[in-house]
Image (cartoon, rainbow, N blue to C red):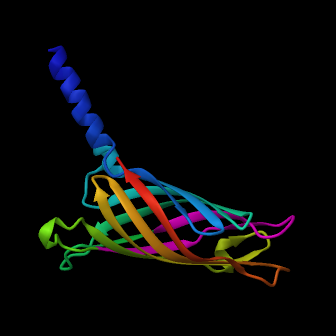
Amino acid sequence: MFKKIVISTLLSSAVLLAESGGSININEKDVEIEGILDSRNLAVMQTTSTIYQADFNFLNADDTKLIGAGVVATNKVEGLIGVEMSFGAKAIWAEVGVDSNFAALPLMAQIRYTLPPLMYSIPPISFEAKGLYAPSALSYGNSEGYSEMRLSADIEMIDNVKVYGGYRNIHTKYEGISRDLFDTGFYAGLKITY
Protein backbone atom coordinates (compact mmCIF):
# COMPACT_ATOMS: atom_id res chain seq x y z
CA MET A 1 0.00 0.00 0.00
CA PHE A 2 2.75 2.46 0.96
CA LYS A 3 4.56 1.70 -2.32
CA LYS A 4 1.40 2.56 -4.33
CA ILE A 5 0.98 5.85 -2.47
CA VAL A 6 4.62 6.83 -3.08
CA ILE A 7 4.44 5.95 -6.79
CA SER A 8 1.11 7.79 -7.18
CA THR A 9 2.52 10.84 -5.45
CA LEU A 10 5.62 10.90 -7.65
CA LEU A 11 3.60 10.46 -10.87
CA SER A 12 1.07 13.15 -9.92
CA SER A 13 3.93 15.51 -8.97
CA ALA A 14 5.47 15.02 -12.40
CA VAL A 15 2.13 15.85 -14.03
CA LEU A 16 1.55 18.86 -11.79
CA LEU A 17 4.96 20.32 -12.62
CA ALA A 18 4.86 19.82 -16.42
CA GLU A 19 5.61 22.78 -18.72
CA SER A 20 6.31 25.40 -16.07
CA GLY A 21 9.80 26.80 -15.83
CA GLY A 22 12.22 29.65 -15.73
CA SER A 23 14.74 31.28 -18.01
CA ILE A 24 17.50 33.82 -18.05
CA ASN A 25 18.72 35.78 -21.06
CA ILE A 26 21.52 38.28 -21.46
CA ASN A 27 23.24 40.56 -23.91
CA GLU A 28 26.10 43.02 -23.52
CA LYS A 29 24.14 45.44 -21.28
CA ASP A 30 20.97 43.64 -20.14
CA VAL A 31 19.85 40.67 -18.08
CA GLU A 32 16.29 39.31 -17.98
CA ILE A 33 14.79 36.65 -15.71
CA GLU A 34 11.49 35.04 -16.70
CA GLY A 35 9.15 32.51 -15.11
CA ILE A 36 6.07 30.67 -16.40
CA LEU A 37 3.37 28.80 -14.49
CA ASP A 38 1.29 26.53 -16.71
CA SER A 39 -2.27 25.31 -16.04
CA ARG A 40 -1.19 21.84 -17.16
CA ASN A 41 0.41 21.75 -13.70
CA LEU A 42 -3.04 21.70 -12.14
CA ALA A 43 -4.91 18.87 -13.84
CA VAL A 44 -8.14 19.92 -12.10
CA MET A 45 -8.10 23.24 -14.01
CA GLN A 46 -7.43 21.58 -17.37
CA THR A 47 -10.98 20.91 -18.65
CA THR A 48 -10.47 22.10 -22.25
CA SER A 49 -7.66 22.15 -24.80
CA THR A 50 -6.96 25.79 -23.90
CA ILE A 51 -3.89 26.20 -21.71
CA TYR A 52 -3.69 29.10 -19.27
CA GLN A 53 -0.29 30.51 -18.36
CA ALA A 54 0.90 33.12 -15.89
CA ASP A 55 4.22 34.69 -16.81
CA PHE A 56 6.54 36.98 -14.91
CA ASN A 57 9.65 38.84 -16.02
CA PHE A 58 12.26 41.19 -14.63
CA LEU A 59 14.48 43.10 -17.08
CA ASN A 60 17.50 45.10 -15.93
CA ALA A 61 18.37 47.15 -19.01
CA ASP A 62 21.20 49.67 -18.76
CA ASP A 63 20.45 50.23 -15.05
CA THR A 64 16.73 50.81 -15.65
CA LYS A 65 14.27 48.17 -14.57
CA LEU A 66 11.07 46.69 -15.99
CA ILE A 67 8.79 44.24 -14.19
CA GLY A 68 5.90 42.43 -15.85
CA ALA A 69 3.23 39.93 -14.78
CA GLY A 70 0.61 38.59 -17.13
CA VAL A 71 -1.92 35.92 -18.00
CA VAL A 72 -2.46 34.33 -21.43
CA ALA A 73 -4.69 31.66 -22.95
CA THR A 74 -2.94 29.36 -25.45
CA ASN A 75 -4.34 26.88 -27.92
CA LYS A 76 -3.28 25.03 -31.07
CA VAL A 77 -4.42 26.51 -34.39
CA GLU A 78 -6.63 23.97 -36.14
CA GLY A 79 -5.38 22.94 -39.54
CA LEU A 80 -1.84 24.21 -38.93
CA ILE A 81 0.30 21.51 -37.38
CA GLY A 82 2.79 22.83 -34.84
CA VAL A 83 1.26 26.34 -34.54
CA GLU A 84 0.03 27.73 -31.21
CA MET A 85 -1.49 31.16 -30.58
CA SER A 86 -1.78 32.97 -27.27
CA PHE A 87 -3.78 36.04 -26.27
CA GLY A 88 -3.84 37.85 -22.94
CA ALA A 89 -2.74 40.91 -20.96
CA LYS A 90 0.28 41.86 -18.89
CA ALA A 91 0.78 44.47 -16.17
CA ILE A 92 4.01 46.44 -16.72
CA TRP A 93 5.94 48.68 -14.32
CA ALA A 94 9.18 50.36 -15.36
CA GLU A 95 11.63 53.09 -14.41
CA VAL A 96 11.71 55.73 -17.14
CA GLY A 97 13.46 58.62 -15.44
CA VAL A 98 15.06 59.71 -12.21
CA ASP A 99 11.77 60.10 -10.34
CA SER A 100 9.41 58.70 -12.97
CA ASN A 101 7.68 55.33 -12.83
CA PHE A 102 5.79 53.88 -15.77
CA ALA A 103 2.68 51.67 -15.51
CA ALA A 104 0.58 50.10 -18.25
CA LEU A 105 -1.65 47.10 -18.97
CA PRO A 106 -0.86 46.10 -22.55
CA LEU A 107 -2.76 43.47 -24.50
CA MET A 108 -0.57 40.61 -25.71
CA ALA A 109 -0.59 38.29 -28.74
CA GLN A 110 1.90 35.53 -29.43
CA ILE A 111 2.39 32.91 -32.12
CA ARG A 112 4.70 29.89 -31.80
CA TYR A 113 5.65 27.40 -34.49
CA THR A 114 7.41 24.14 -33.64
CA LEU A 115 8.99 22.35 -36.57
CA PRO A 116 7.83 18.77 -37.11
CA PRO A 117 10.27 16.07 -35.96
CA LEU A 118 13.32 16.13 -38.21
CA MET A 119 15.49 13.29 -39.49
CA TYR A 120 18.73 12.14 -37.88
CA SER A 121 17.53 12.88 -34.31
CA ILE A 122 17.79 16.66 -34.67
CA PRO A 123 16.39 18.26 -31.46
CA PRO A 124 13.03 20.10 -31.55
CA ILE A 125 13.26 23.66 -32.95
CA SER A 126 10.66 26.43 -32.41
CA PHE A 127 10.13 30.01 -33.59
CA GLU A 128 8.13 32.60 -31.66
CA ALA A 129 6.81 36.13 -32.25
CA LYS A 130 5.23 38.20 -29.46
CA GLY A 131 3.69 41.66 -29.43
CA LEU A 132 2.33 43.81 -26.60
CA TYR A 133 0.52 47.11 -27.05
CA ALA A 134 -1.07 49.59 -24.64
CA PRO A 135 -2.51 52.88 -25.93
CA SER A 136 -2.94 55.78 -23.52
CA ALA A 137 -6.29 54.31 -22.36
CA LEU A 138 -4.39 51.33 -20.88
CA SER A 139 -1.50 53.42 -19.51
CA TYR A 140 -1.71 54.87 -16.03
CA GLY A 141 -0.54 58.07 -14.34
CA ASN A 142 1.70 60.06 -16.67
CA SER A 143 2.32 57.06 -18.91
CA GLU A 144 1.16 57.59 -22.49
CA GLY A 145 1.69 54.21 -24.17
CA TYR A 146 3.64 50.99 -24.31
CA SER A 147 4.73 48.70 -27.13
CA GLU A 148 6.93 45.63 -27.20
CA MET A 149 7.94 43.29 -30.00
CA ARG A 150 9.98 40.09 -29.62
CA LEU A 151 11.19 37.50 -32.12
CA SER A 152 12.99 34.38 -30.92
CA ALA A 153 14.02 30.83 -31.77
CA ASP A 154 14.89 27.95 -29.47
CA ILE A 155 16.27 24.44 -29.67
CA GLU A 156 15.83 21.74 -27.01
CA MET A 157 19.34 20.35 -26.71
CA ILE A 158 18.62 18.30 -23.56
CA ASP A 159 15.20 17.13 -22.35
CA ASN A 160 13.49 20.14 -20.71
CA VAL A 161 16.47 22.46 -21.39
CA LYS A 162 16.29 24.92 -24.28
CA VAL A 163 18.91 27.28 -25.65
CA TYR A 164 17.36 30.33 -27.29
CA GLY A 165 18.14 33.63 -28.92
CA GLY A 166 16.09 36.54 -30.11
CA TYR A 167 15.51 40.24 -30.61
CA ARG A 168 13.41 42.61 -28.47
CA ASN A 169 12.26 46.19 -28.96
CA ILE A 170 10.47 47.94 -26.06
CA HIS A 171 9.03 51.49 -26.09
CA THR A 172 7.63 53.30 -23.03
CA LYS A 173 5.98 56.66 -23.80
CA TYR A 174 5.90 58.93 -20.76
CA GLU A 175 4.74 62.53 -20.38
CA GLY A 176 7.66 64.97 -20.37
CA ILE A 177 10.29 62.45 -21.51
CA SER A 178 11.13 62.66 -25.21
CA ARG A 179 13.10 59.40 -25.41
CA ASP A 180 10.60 56.52 -25.52
CA LEU A 181 12.94 53.64 -26.43
CA PHE A 182 13.34 51.58 -23.25
CA ASP A 183 15.42 48.73 -24.68
CA THR A 184 16.33 47.17 -28.01
CA GLY A 185 18.76 44.49 -29.01
CA PHE A 186 19.60 40.86 -29.50
CA TYR A 187 19.81 38.42 -26.58
CA ALA A 188 20.60 34.78 -25.85
CA GLY A 189 19.56 32.58 -22.97
CA LEU A 190 18.75 29.30 -21.32
CA LYS A 191 15.25 28.03 -20.48
CA ILE A 192 14.49 25.14 -18.12
CA THR A 193 11.04 23.56 -17.93
CA TYR A 194 9.83 21.00 -15.43
Residue 126 locus on image (x, y percent): 31, 71
Determine the residue positioned at 39% across, 74% down: 128
- The image quadrant of residue 97 is bottom right
Q: Would residue 122 appear left or right of 38 to someone viewing this image?
A: left
**Number of labelled discs?**
0
Residue 119 locus on image (x, y percent): 12, 72
Which residue appears farthest toward the top when viewing the image? 1
Residue 48 locus on image (x, y percent): 25, 57
Relative vertical location of residue 171 with respect to residue 29 in this rendering, above or below? below
Determine the residue positioned at 58% across, 72% down: 106
Determine the residue positioned at 81% across, 84% down: 178
Specify the principal SS of the magenta part.
Answer: strand
Q: Would residue 164 appear left or right of 1 to someone viewing this image?
A: right
Relative vertical location of residue 17 with respect to residue 156 in this rendering, above or below? above
Residue 36 visible somewhere in the drawing: no
Judge by depth and name the residue closer to the eye, 134 or 8.
8
Q: Is residue 112 magenta?
A: yes
Q: Is residue 12 magenta?
A: no
Residue 140 visible somewhere in the drawing: yes
Quadrant placement of the N terminus? top left
Judge by depth and name the residue closer to the eye, 178 or 167.
167
Q: Would residue 97 appear left or right of 91 to someone viewing this image?
A: right
Specify start and end residues of the magenta stretch as a single range. 88-113
- The image quadrant of residue 137 is bottom right
